[in-house]
Image (cartoon, rainbow, N blue to C red):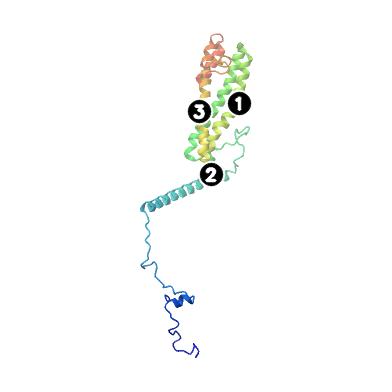
């Protein structure tokens, strides 16, 4: 009889017990019992989440939110400045100062934030004061040269003026202008470092110690005292320059 017609195809010779030797000999694979895992089963795994990690995550989320808000504020500020420049029709590289002979671009009203414009105007006035002092230094030393002080001090005063005006603009005023307009920490650092050197030069010029040609190439206190004893006009001009500083 065919196995398909046998009402009990699993006879005694073919055991269905997976642990019997017959099944192992025949190469049968015992069925795998389905064991519920997770979601309430007996093999559930518990995951412990430290509270400190959750607090750190919330703190980082707050920091990211603060940084995003600050970035948006900076973007709005930059867009406001760009719009202001676009309305004026002045490009950032357009030379507009001095008005009678433009050689630099300078626009505090449109490129510097409102809260920093007063400080920038004071810095600009300070730079203009340095320019006037160097020009007056040439005039005073010229008077001293005419009175017999020597031609070397005159050439030194010319060198001070030709180098002092552009270097003071490039080394400390321009970094401050860029730092105010872009809020750059690097430009602020460059300004503070180089402005200290500028202050040191101003102190030396005000005292005029007898280092180079008895200090007469700079119109300071010691130079005025030294010259006024023999040349009243030259000494008075030197002293007036120092008082003007």
In the rendered structure, the answer to whether residue 19 lies left or right of residue 151 reads: left
**Which residue is nearer to you in this view: 157 or 144?**
157
Residue at the disc numbered 1: 163
Q: Residues within 10 Å of mark 2 (few under 14, many from 20)?
A: some
Q: CA distance from mark 1 to mark 2?
A: 33 Å
Residue at position x 63%, y 19% from top?
Answer: 155
Decide: is 85 above or below 159: below
Q: Residues within 10 Å of mark 3 (few under 14, many from 20)?
A: few
**Which residue is nearer to you in this view: 178 or 35?**
35
Please identify the quarter of the rendering in which residue 172 is found: top right
Residue at the disc numbered 3: 196
State which mark lies toward you, 1 or 2: 1
- Label 2 or label 3, whichever comes before in sequence order: 2
Decide: is 47 above or below 74: below
Residue at position x 48%, y 40% from top?
Answer: 114
Q: Position of residue 156 (x, y in %)?
A: 61, 19
- Label 1 or label 2, whichever comes before in sequence order: 2
Q: Residues within 10 Å of mark 1 (few under 14, many from 20)?
A: few
């Amino acid at each position: 009889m065919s196995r398909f017609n046998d009402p009990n195809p699993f006879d005694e010779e073919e055991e269905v017990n997976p642990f019997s030797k017959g099944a192992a000999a025949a190469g049968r694979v015992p069925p795998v019992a389905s064991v519920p895992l997770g979601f309430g089963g007996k093999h559930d795994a518990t995951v412990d989440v430290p509270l400190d990690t959750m607090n750190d995550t919330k703190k980082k989320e707050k920091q990211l939110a603060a940084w995003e808000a600050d970035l948006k504020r900076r973007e709005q500020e930059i867009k406001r400045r760009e719009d202001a420049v676009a309305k004026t029709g002045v490009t950032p590289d357009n030379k507009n100062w001095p008005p009678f002979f433009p050689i630099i671009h300078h626009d505090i009203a449109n490129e510097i934030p409102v809260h920093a414009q007063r400080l920038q105007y004071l810095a600009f006035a300070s730079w203009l004061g340095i320019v006037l002092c160097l020009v007056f230094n040439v005039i005073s030393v010229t008077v001293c040269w005419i009175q017999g002080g020597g031609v070397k001090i005159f050439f030194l005063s010319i060198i001070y003026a030709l180098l002092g005006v552009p270097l003071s603009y490039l080394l400390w005023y321009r970094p401050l202008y860029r730092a105010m307009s872009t809020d750059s920490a690097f430009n602020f650092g460059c300004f503070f470092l180089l402005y200290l050197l500028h202050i040191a030069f101003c102190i030396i010029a005000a005292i005029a110690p007898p280092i180079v040609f008895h200090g007469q190439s700079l119109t300071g206190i010691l130079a005025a005292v030294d010259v006024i004893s023999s040349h009243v006009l030259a000494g008075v001009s030197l002293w007036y320059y120092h008082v003007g500083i």
